[in-house]
Amino acid sequence: MFENLSGRFSRIVQQLRGHARLTEDNIASTMRDVRMALLEADVALPVVKAFIEQVEAGALGKEVSSSLNPGQALVKVVQDELVHLMGDGQASLNLNVPPPAVILMAGLQGSGKTTTVAKLGKWCREKHDKSVVVASCDIYRPAALEQMRVLAGENRLEYFAAGERKQPVAIAEAALKHARSRFADVLIVDTAGRLHIDEDMMAEIRHIHSALTPSDTLFLVDSMMGQDAVNAARAFNDALDLTGVVLTKVDGDARGGAALSVRHVTGKPILFLGTGEKTSELSSFYPDRIASRILGMGDMLSLIEEVEEKTDQEKAKKIARKLKKGRGFNLDDFRDQVRQMQSMGGLSGLLDKMPGMQQMSMDSVGGLAGQEHELVKFEAIINSMTPGERRFPAVVNGSRKKRIASGSGTQIQDINRLLKQFGRMQKMMKKLSKKGGMENMMRGLGGNMPRGGFRR
């Protein structure tokens, strides 16, 4: 996420920290680099100008000039201005209203509204224990209503069927009446994608808004659209009086221009980030955490929260109990570790949140991609083994390797790599189970794990 912008800013931060004193020349040079980084990230020009002016004012301020380490003090100025640009403090949905709290979704065609409705419904149910009804007013896109029905079923949300109603406003009014009759806490209404230059469609969504009087009106913006997204957000905000923004597809956005521009242009907070296609891949937007990641400082709070949410605590305890009893770490356990790593975005997802590791992730992106693929291979190989082979990998001989390779669509060399890597991890687990295990494990990591990841 935002790899290009993060790479440029990380280098700028390193240069700044190396300055024992700040002069007009090195401040001007730094600001040129910052300006170029923002423009290359497709940040809107007025936003770039405002940001540079604020940082320059801070750079010439008393706090920086009198600091014992002015370079680091200026880094703090840049970080604070990034946070301010994206919104000071975390904003949230307005769910503390007489039920149902109505959330209206608006956006351009292809921005991911329908999937985000399911994501948001799941978020309300799991995070806030709310009963949720979802409805779709998209009568134009083929199978849009059916897609909403399927997603609702998969995520344990109640779906309101449009039935014979053919008008979006009529569907919205009936959905609100239904949600009230069911004493639902939240009603989320999907709308058809529309271009902000289409007057008839914009008039339609204004009528839907008037019929629902929603507590939140969210604009969904594809973060990869760059400045086009900002122009669309401005137009929708003028038409609907938005209360917040959801950035979708940020997992594919290497630039980050939309994240840095939308808040400044619309004045509306970014509430959520869509980080993938799965309905679990929706995260709250924290300006301070995103600023830290852009500057290469990592995001340990999000990483800790993700580990707590996405790792199977019972499986972790089971492995710990096995180790305490002296029972071996086997390939079933290894596969569980691989799956949990993948659930947190794989190696690149973990590195992106660790301080100082973003640049490593970008410098070795080809290597990381290969290692991500290697994890997928490892799981396929383990799945092709018998339960006995997973518990006792030592029995895997030449003929068994041929059978496993055929069943998993891999090569015998891949199986050899898996067994070799598993052997290293097994040794570390044995050290961990002994007295002083953590120290032994760290020594094992230092001696056995390669700098670039998995050994081949």
Image (tube, rainbow, N blue to C red):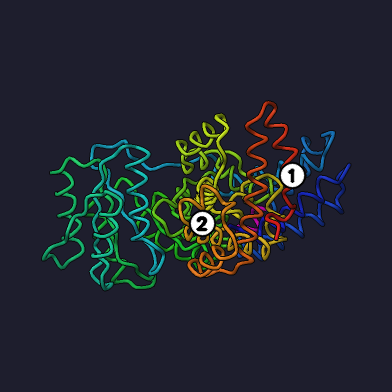
Residue closer to the observer: 101 or 232: 101
The residue at the point 88 percent across, 42 percent down is 21
Residue closer to the observer: 429 or 371: 429
Position of residue 104 measured from the top left corner of the image (x, y, whole percent): 31, 54
Whether residue 235 is visible here, answered yes or no, is yes
The amino acid at mark 2 is Ile
Q: Is residue 445 above or below residue 31?
A: above
The residue at the point 70 percent across, 46 percent down is 78
Q: Is residue 92 left or right of residue 259?
A: left
Position of residue 245 measured from the top left corner of the image (x, y, whole percent): 44, 53
Q: Nearer the viewer, mark 1 or mark 2?
A: 2
Residue closer to the observer: 219 or 138: 138
Q: Is residue 15 left or right of residue 313?
A: right
The numbered disc on residue 431 is: none
User: Label 1: how many residues lie within 10 Å, few (<14), some (14-19) or many (20+)?
Assistant: many
Asked if residue 277 is among those painted magenta in the image, a careful observer would answer no
The numbered disc on residue 75 is: 1
Residue closer to the observer: 205 or 224: 224
Distance, label 1 to label 2, CA atoms, is 47 Å
Position of residue 375 measured from the top left corner of the image (x, y, whole percent): 57, 58
Say which label, 1 or 2, has the lower sequence index. 1
Give the extent of the magenta segment: 47-51
User: Label 2: how many residues lie within 10 Å, few (<14), some (14-19) or many (20+)?
Assistant: many
Displayed quadrant of residue 203: bottom left
The numbered disc on residue 382 is: 2
Identify the secondary structure beneath mark 1: helix
